[in-house]
Amino acid sequence: MEEDRVPRREAGGRAPEIQMNMNLAIGKSMRWWEKGLQPNMREIESAQDLVDSLANAGDRLVIVDFFSPGCGGCRALHPKICQFAEQNPDVLFLQVNYEEHKSMCYSLHVHVLPFFRFYRGAQGRLCSFSCTNATIKKFRDALAKHKPDRCSIGPTRGLDESELLALAANKDLQFTYTKKPELIPTGDGAAEVIAPEPAKLPSPLVKMGSEERSLVSSGR
């Protein structure tokens, strides 16, 4: 019978394929953070991706935008951030999805959203702050202050070494980092650095390492 050739419909009254298409459309429409993206905006995929992106930026100003799909403030601010990116094509905007990189954000001490960090050349991190549409002037002022062209002396710094060590210590991340060896001076001044009195407190290098290990272990 002809009736047997009519597609069966679910209890809701829609054919299965129609319902599937609707679900896909709804899922796509919810990805608000992909709307309005400019060529100088991209989403970070891993801790290694973040480290490499900062290291390869040279003297270019880099703004790292930490957001969450479920954050109303992040969603409201997104069109404005896209506008800033369009107006400043020489600035690199990196997006970090908190929901996909919670462990990495925890190691980087990101506990409030939306949150921004500015990096540039040999200076490394310039500033970090949280802001919303109501306090967007904070973002605008930071961009105006740190955008002017400059030439860094020395290699691009990127993340602080303490942050790199914290990422490497995080077992949830596939990221490795070896602490850079401390340069030992040569010549007449070498003895002053290499031969401290045994009775004194540990050198700043040893003290710094112990603090970093304490921070990482407490974070885990």
Image (cartoon, rainbow, N blue to C red):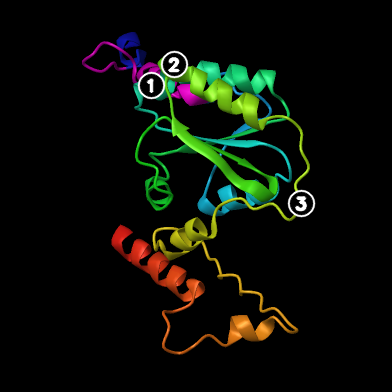
Q: Residue placed farthest to the left in the image?
A: 11
Q: Residues within 10 Å of mark 1 (few under 14, many from 20)?
A: some
- The answer to whether residue 26 is left or right of residue 86 is left
Identified by mark 2, the residue type is Asn
Query: At x 42% / y 24%, what residue is drawn?
Result: 74
Asked whether the residues under the numbered discs 2 and 1 touch, taking CB atoms below 8 Å apart as contact, a structural biologist would say yes
Query: At x 69% / y 80%, what residue is drawn?
Result: 189
In three-dimensional space, the C-alpha distance between marks 2 and 3, rounded to whole angstroms, equals: 36 Å
Number of on-image labels: 3
- Give the main secondary structure of the magenta stretch: helix
- The answer to whether residue 100 is left or right of residue 92 is left
Nearer to me, 39 or 131 = 131
- The answer to whether residue 57 is left or right of residue 170 is right
Does residue 11 show up magenta in the picture?
Answer: yes
For marks 3 and 1 on the same chain, the one whose residue lies earlier in the sequence: 1
Q: Residue 100 location in percent, x, y?
A: 41, 42
Nearer to me, 52 or 24 = 52
Which quarter of the figure is the C terminus placed in? bottom left
Q: In the rendered structure, find residue 133 and report the number of the disc placed on it.
A: 2
Q: Which residue is mark 1?
A: 73
Residue range of the region highlighted in magenta in the rendering: 8-33
Q: Residues within 10 Å of mark 3 (few under 14, many from 20)?
A: few
Secondary structure category for the residue under label 3: loop
Q: Which residue is mark 3?
A: 153
- The answer to whether residue 77 is left or right of residue 84 is left
Which quarter of the figure is the N terminus placed in? top left
